[in-house]
Amino acid sequence: MIPDLLHGTPGFEWLESISFRAAMAAFTAFLLALLGGGPAIAWLRSHRVGENTSKTDAPELARRAEESGKNRTPTMGGSFLIASLVISVLLWCDVGNLQVVLGLVLVAGLSAVGFVDDYLKLAVPGSSGLSAKAKLGGQTIATLFVVVGFAWYAHASGRFSLLDVHPPFLKDVEIPLGGTILGTLVFIAFGWLVIAGTSNATNITDGMDGLLAGCVILSGSALAVFCYVTGRSDWTFYLDLPYIPEAAEMAVMGAALVGASLGFLYHNAYPADVFMGDSGSLPIGGLLAWMAVVAKQELVLPLLGFVFFAELGSSALQRFWYRRTGGKRLFTMAPIHHGLQTTGGIFRPGKKEWHEVKIVIRAWIVAAVCAMASLALMRLR
């Protein structure tokens, strides 16, 4: 860590500032993703690491991908996004902070699951990657390792309040879960649901050029603010929020995520030079959720990441409705962005199909509004 190397050196005390390190983490991750993206994409293209769009169960999407040349676009771009994030975190974060360490472990674990899934799709003829059960199993192992470790720390240090859940809108109300074994088990199950659910939500959202990266930039920025505020005793006292001193360090990690996503978006903007793939979409969703857990904003996350959960919900409801009604569809196509792209409507075909760029930009607008609304909740308690 750069600040550690200069710790105690006269004239460099400002390097220990959270706000300065967050800005530098974002800038470093951005440059790494921006400059490293070109060589990485060239390597992926030379090794023909391309998306196999013919494996989709929607013929219309396969046809559009073929016509637009997306089947020749390399995938697994999330690999250099995550590498940029991790390098920046190691340079600018306090790696002695437990929340940061657990965040890195979570990112590494979910990246490994995503990498295996991407690799199987590319290397094994006819493979659709990991089965849904295998992918969820890998996510569960990585998530439970982190959540159980966090719960163990809360008990070992006597800081049971780290496991409390704080509902929005309600002043001085918390749901204590850390004082009993049953409560701790409930927190572990709740933490698994939040992290694994968000990881799957971002994975499903990754279906259009720039859609996921742009939304992550907006949601990640809001969560970085939550972490920073939660780590400040003066601000938490004024806003009546839970005070978690170590949470401020997660603002630096969140800033690195935003910077890396910005650098990746440069290469992923329409028409994309590279796709993210599961190796990127799974871990960034998990990290967003982990930031929410650390900042005690788990119940605000559905609003803050509304686009992600709308995409996840549409896919889940479509699958449920299809099985319940014997083949009928609730939405024109799921997830929602594909329904708008192919039919121009969500529940029934519209008068005109939406262009991919219009869908992405409007999703960014929704994500920005929801991020601002979630920040406003800090004052509405």
Image (spheres, grey):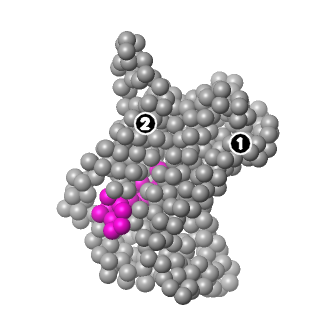
The answer to which quarter of the image holds residue 370 is bottom right
Q: Residues within 10 Å of mark 1 (few under 14, many from 20)?
A: few
Q: Is residue 177 left or right of residue 220?
A: right
Above or below, 327 relative to 7: below
Residue 217 locus on image (x, y percent) = 47, 51
Above or below, 221 relative to 160: below
Residue 143 locus on image (x, y percent) = 55, 46
**Residue 270 part of the magenta-drawn span:** yes
The answer to which quarter of the image holds residue 11 is top left
> Looking at the image, which residue is at 43% across and 73% down?
356
> Looking at the image, which residue is at 60% across and 74% down?
319
Q: Amino acid at mark 2?
A: Ala
Which residue is tagged 1?
Answer: 379
Which residue is tagged 2?
Answer: 23
Q: Is residue 160 left or right of residue 280?
A: right
Q: Is residue 102 visible?
A: no
The answer to which quarter of the image holds residue 162 is top right
Above or below, 320 relative to 230: below
Q: Earlier in the sequence, mark 1 or mark 2?
A: 2
Residue 22 locus on image (x, y percent) = 45, 35
**Which quarter of the rendering shows the C terminus?**
top right
Q: Residues within 10 Å of mark 2 (few under 14, many from 20)?
A: some
Q: Which mark is residue 48?
A: none
Q: Is residue 33 visible?
A: yes
Q: Which residues are magenta?
A: 267-284
Q: Secondary structure at mark 2?
A: helix
Q: Depth check: 225 or 285 in front?
A: 225
**Which quarter of the rendering shows the N terminus?**
top left
Above or below, 136 relative to 342: above
> Looking at the image, which residue is at 46% across and 71% down?
358
